[in-house]
Amino acid sequence: MSRATYLQKIIHRMTCFIFVLVTIAGWFNIKADHVFMKFNTLSREQEITGWGTSAAWWAQIAGESENAEELAKLLYSEEGLGLNIYRYNVGGGEKDNPATRLPGNEWRATESFLVYDEATGEYSYDWSKDAAAQKMLELSLEQGCVDTVVLFANSPHYTMTESGSAAGSYQDNTCNLKDGYADDFAKYMCDVAEYFIGKGVPVKYISPINEPQWSWGGGWVGQEGCHYELEDIIEVGEAFAAEIKARDLDVKLSLAESGCISDDTMNYIDAIAENEAIMDVLGTYAYHSYWTDDIAYKYAFGKYMEKNYKSLELEMSEWCELPNEHKIDEIDAAIIMAREISEDVTLTGVNSWTSWVAVNDGLYDADSMIGANGDCSEYVIGKRYYAMAHFAKFVPAGSRAVNFDISVADISAEEAWWDDVVDEKAYDHYIIENRMNVSAFRTPEGNYVAVIVNNGAEKEFTYVMPGYTMSVYTTDAERDLELTADKWAVGKVQVPEKSLVTVVFEPVI
């Protein structure tokens, strides 16, 4: 069966099941306000390796501001989100490019360590460049939570491109990396990796390709980016694999940061998996969840990965709301983000989840967790920040996703409703009137955590968890991660209308 046929078959059958489920839930619209949930304490699904955010492009602005340390604490300290994954953008140098296609863009044009030396007429490294972004990285590392740094590139350095610009080719859907420059690109990125490793930065992954299927350049120029055809991805991957091995670098390769699950993502992994040289150094297969609020695609992709590449670590490395239709302080913004996290964990089975972007330009209109003005002298903590907090603060690296039994309005749903699609047990993920989903985890300390994303009316949860106490944290239109129950006896939890609720179960000692 071809990949396209596999995907179409799964999506068709999923659509039928979704229709039936939503119809049944509609019949019990009045009664479906009480949910019974019991953890399957014997189940162990994928390990969660962490939560993170990208430092592009805000770090090069925020690092120069008086709020740099405050922002680092909000994101990377235990008192803040406690994120452990930091994505550092190795820029293509458009800020220094004399022929830049991004003039005056302080947020999206980047500095590069590779600069032109007028004295010698050659390009050489200047490690003092990108100083603000480096400062932001240092401040974040000082918070003590970061154990994984990913060096990622939206484009090769502008000197390595056909157009002479890291902002894309002159023609739509055309690879902008110069012919024969894959090795130079690999050497450049590995030089940067060695520089950071020498400073004690925990660089775990190099990610040279970002959203290869998008056009980048041509009729639209808005940021650094580079289109790659499938054969280009393999060529670049082979060059990086050879360079990493030649240097005996203690880093892994991350590919291919596909921009959307429904577009070429399975084709990329199939081609990569057939290449022994790349697979020898591949650490994670990464994708982005943009424009994919479709559980059928996520489920089909998750099952495809589980069936064919179960041992490969899967990473969701970028997401923000596109198009951004919500102000930063709206609860709907948080609900959408939390739903994406929950679906990526339970349906595609990701090991890590990283947002794009932590901070963005626009105090209340930003599509980020924190909104800021142009120089980051002012900032606003948004509801999306708390959406991430409901997961990151309570589900540390080393936790595992777990299955659970659930019933709604006395309708038994103890088996996942799509089990018959593939004749095997799937990740438990439940949607009630398409307005609520639940994900569950077991932490290394032995706690159980349930994260409820409720986009509908108020509901009451009853938990069966003998030998445990529960603490409840609630975010809604009026509250931000408020402790609404502190080590209560396990029982009923009120889940407000349009809210996020995290329930932490701790064993009674």
Image (cartoon, rainbow, N blue to C red):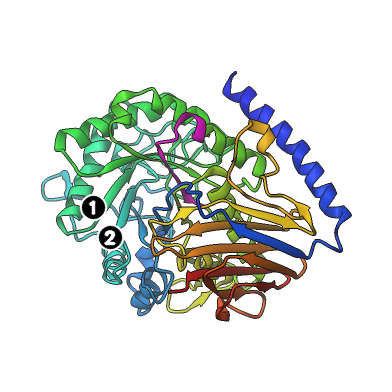
Point 30% across, 53% down: residue: 96
Quarter of the N terminus within the rendering: top right
| Disc 1 + disc 2, Cβ < 8 Å | yes
Point 82% across, 53% down: residue: 25
Residue 458 visible in the snapshot: yes
Q: Secondary structure at mark 1?
A: loop
Whichever of callouts 1 and 2 sits on the residue coming sooner in the sequence is 1
Per the image, the residue denoted by label 2 is: 130
- The amino acid marked with disc number 1 is Phe
C-alpha distance separating marks 1 and 2:
7 Å
Residue 229 visible in the snapshot: no
Rendered position, 73 above or below 217: below
Q: Is residue 364 left or right of residue 73?
A: right
Q: Secondary structure at mark 2?
A: loop
Range covered by the magenta-colored residues: 306-318
Q: Is residue 64 left or right of residue 18?
A: left
- The amino acid marked with disc number 2 is Asp
Rendered position, 77 above or below 190: below
Per the image, the residue denoted by label 1 is: 113
User: Of all residues shown, which one is farthest toward the left?
Assistant: 120
Q: Mark 2, residues whose alpha carbon is within 10 Å: few (<14), some, or many (≥20)?
A: some
Whether the magenta-drawn stretch holds residue 311 is answered as yes
Closer to the camera, 468 or 120? Answer: 468
Whether the magenta-drawn stretch holds residue 171 is answered as no
Quarter of the C terminus within the rendering: bottom left
Point 26% across, 64% down: residue: 131
* Percent coordinates x, y for residue 200 in the rendering: 18, 59
Q: Is residue 92 left or right of residue 442?
A: left
The numbered mark at residue 6 is none
* Percent coordinates x, y for residue 66 in the rendering: 35, 80
